[in-house]
Amino acid sequence: MKLTAKWANVVAGVALLLSVSANAAASATWTQWPSVGQASLSWLWFDVYHSTLRTPSGQYDGQQAPLALQIRYQREISAQELLDATSEQWQKLGYSTEQIAPWLKQLSAIFPNVTEGDQLVYVSAGEAGDFYYQAKHQSGFKLLGQVTEPALNQAFIAIWLSPQTEYPKLRQQLIGAS
């Protein structure tokens, strides 16, 4: 009986290692993935950000497939403003306060303050993902944090890629539909 429990722990450990390795491999190569589409978000006469969606195939295969959402900011935005905007978008998508609150707590430990030219990238391996950051004059991307909860992973991607997004034209451009 103890041998079975030990083997169960070994199998669980190997499965976790393979999952983390697959996510790390996807994260490490996203910069070489082709672009699916690009879009810009402007508010009144202010450019907020330019975004690019990348996948291994260069085609959008849905939110469960590996993808990278790359955002280059066109203005200074505090981490708190990013959190507030994220919360607002989740509310518009119908997520409950009970769902949103722990997600925001996790993202508050990840999101940086951004300035014009900085990039924030979310790389999803399907159920989990990694946040990367590159300051305007920095070479290379720095890993900021990881999302291991599938529901948070999907909710974050949904802000841009859900058919119910507040910005359907931006979504269409990102997924290469227009």
Image (cartoon, rainbow, N blue to C red):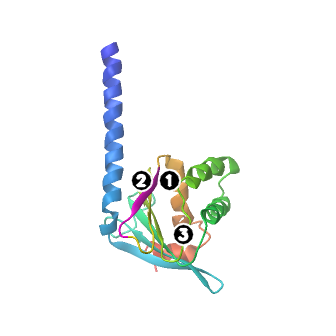
Decide: is 44 above or below 160: below
Do labels 2 and 3 touch, CB within 8 Å?
no
Residue appearing at x 30%, y 16% in the figure: 3
CA–CA distance in space, label 1 to label 2: 8 Å
* Left/right of residue 100 with respect to residue 119 in the rendered view: right
- Tell me which corner region of the image, top left, top right, bottom left or bottom right, holds residue 138: bottom left
Do labels 1 and 3 touch, CB within 8 Å?
no
Label 1 crowd (10 A; few <14 / some 14-19 / many >=20) = many
Q: Which residue is mark 3?
A: 114
Q: Residue furthest bottom?
A: 45
Label 2 crowd (10 A; few <14 / some 14-19 / many >=20) = some
Do labels 1 and 2 touch, CB within 8 Å?
yes
Residue 76 seen in render:
yes
Decide: is 68 above or below 171: above
Could you say which is closer to the camera, residue 56 or residue 118?
118
The disc placed on residue 153 is: 1
Q: Residue furthest top?
A: 1
Q: Which residue is mark 2?
A: 126
- Tell me which corner region of the image, top left, top right, bottom left or bottom right, holds residue 14: top left
* Left/right of residue 147 with respect to residue 32 in the rendered view: right
CA–CA distance in space, label 2 to label 3: 26 Å
Q: Is residue 67 magenta?
A: no
Which mark sits nearer the N-terminus, 2 or 3?
3
**What percent of the width, then of the height, locates residue 127?**
44, 50
For the N terminus, the image quarter is top left
Residue appearing at x 54%, y 64% in the figure: 162
| SS assignment at label 3 | loop
CA–CA distance in space, label 1 to label 3: 21 Å
**What percent of the width, then of the height, locates residue 71?**
48, 71
**What percent of the width, then of the height, locates residue 88?**
67, 63
